Image: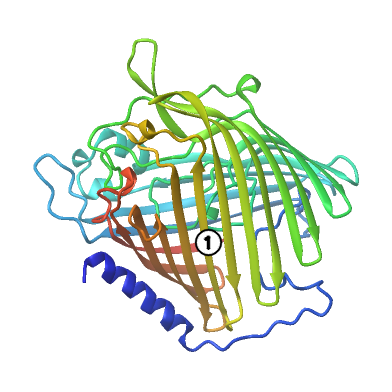
Amino acid sequence: MTMNRLRTTVLLFALLALLGNSRPVIAVADDGLDVLEGFESTPVVAPLTDLPDESDSPFRLSGWFKLGTTWNFAHQAPETDQTDWRGLSRLRPELLLEGDLRLSNDWRLFASVKGFYDFAYGLNDRDNYSSEVLDEYEKELELREAYITGALSSAVDLKVGRQIVVWGRSDNLRVTDILNPLDQREPGLTDIEDLRLPVTMVRLDAHTGPWTLTGLVIPEIRFDKQPVYGHDIYPYTQPLPPEHIPADGLHNAEYAAALNGIFSGWDISFYFAYGYADESHVEPDRSGSPLLKHSRLTMLGLAGERAWGNVLFYAEAAWLDGLEFFNSDKNYSRTDLLGGIEYSGFRNTTLSFEMVRRHLNGYHDQLALSPDQIRKNSDQSVLRLSRTFLHERLILTALASYFGSHGQNGALQRLEGEYELAAAIHTTVGVVLFQSGNLPAFQDIGDSDRFFAEVKWEF
């Protein structure tokens, strides 16, 4: 049995062990009004005017402090002049501060800042790492969400500033959820909800009955944070070409709109966006040198979910037009389809499965050549199981993500346990296992397996 097959077998046994002592719970909907109860799906529309807890003071300061570490255990000894990624790869204290100021009954001001410093690089001798790795991973201080929000009338809300807007229904895969970039510098360690990066937006919501119409103007242009040259997750032997990032401002602004309807037992959303693709493509600059650029895209999307008893079904679809590639002088469109199911019929247990297919319309064989290396169809699936113990103080989670029909293009598995030590203190330990595959990003990732652990104090 190969190591990759062994990893998959270990994961499946872990899933079975979690389910082994579960008893099914039968949910019966009286009139359809509560059929979504118990599912932890993201609300379609987050109210803009949620105020802090009632108190005498209009200002509230909160946040968290955590200490996290990772330990790489599968790397081989490096060749001469290469970085040794064995052993300790992260020892990072991290602090998030949030300030919430109630300006009136309808208006509030919110701001948050996050920073970290990773001591692992100093302990392992900073001279062993590339300048790109040190610049991107050793320290960071960033303004996170920062906005003013309130009600213009009983039916219209306004929110201006750096913020996160979640579209779609999936918790693990992205189809219509394209407004915020992701921090993917250390893939596999955490979920998408903890990876979204805020961007400056002007958001207007108009409510009528079960419907909410949202309009967005996004003048700040940000893209995904990716592994950099010299890091053990970085898939190439050379640095990437320089990246062109459009200047912030209304002349390059992105625009988006959503129509959301929430009904008894089901909901539906329609999306429109005109902005930049997070994925870059290679394009020659004026001198003929390679340059990474981001296509200007139009996206039309649809998402919805329906609950029957203990089962939640959800789906997303998106059509994206304007994709550009190095090996072709024409623009392409792509159709993304996602389906998912979540089952909560076992006591204290949630099991979900999601699958997405991305189909490039009008595909030509030259797109498979370097540097594009684009496939006509790309598939990804995610199996996730989570179960609580000890009166919900312990949460065990197993996740497996496969690229391709059976993981031939790459895969990762994550097993983790989170335990509540005290009312505001949590500790998490786990392991991430990578499987090499045909995709460029996964070709040499199989030896990047790592243990991780963190202690988090919320205040």
- For the point 58% across and 42% down, the residue is 178
**Position of residue 440 measured from the top left corner of the image (x, y, whole percent):** 31, 43
Report which quarter residue 79 is drawn in. top left
Residue type, numbered disc 1 = Glu
Report which quarter residue 432 is drawn in. bottom left
Closest to the observer: 408 or 91? 408
Question: Dot 1 surroundings within 10 Å: few (below 14), some, or many (20 or more)?
Answer: many
- For the point 43% across and 67% down, the residue is 428
Q: Is residue 393 visible?
A: yes
**Position of residue 235 measured from the top left corner of the image (x, y, whole percent):** 29, 43
Vertical side of 281 occupied by 269: above or below: below
Type of colouring: rainbow
**Position of residue 34 measured from the top left corner of the image (x, y, whole percent):** 78, 73
Report which quarter residue 254 is drawn in. top right
Q: Is residue 45 visible?
A: no
Closest to the observer: 374 or 49? 374
Closest to the observer: 398 or 104? 398
Residue labelled with disc 1: 354
Name the quarter where the C terminus is drawn. bottom right
Name the quarter where the N terminus is drawn. bottom left
Q: Is residue 292 left or right of residue 446?
A: right
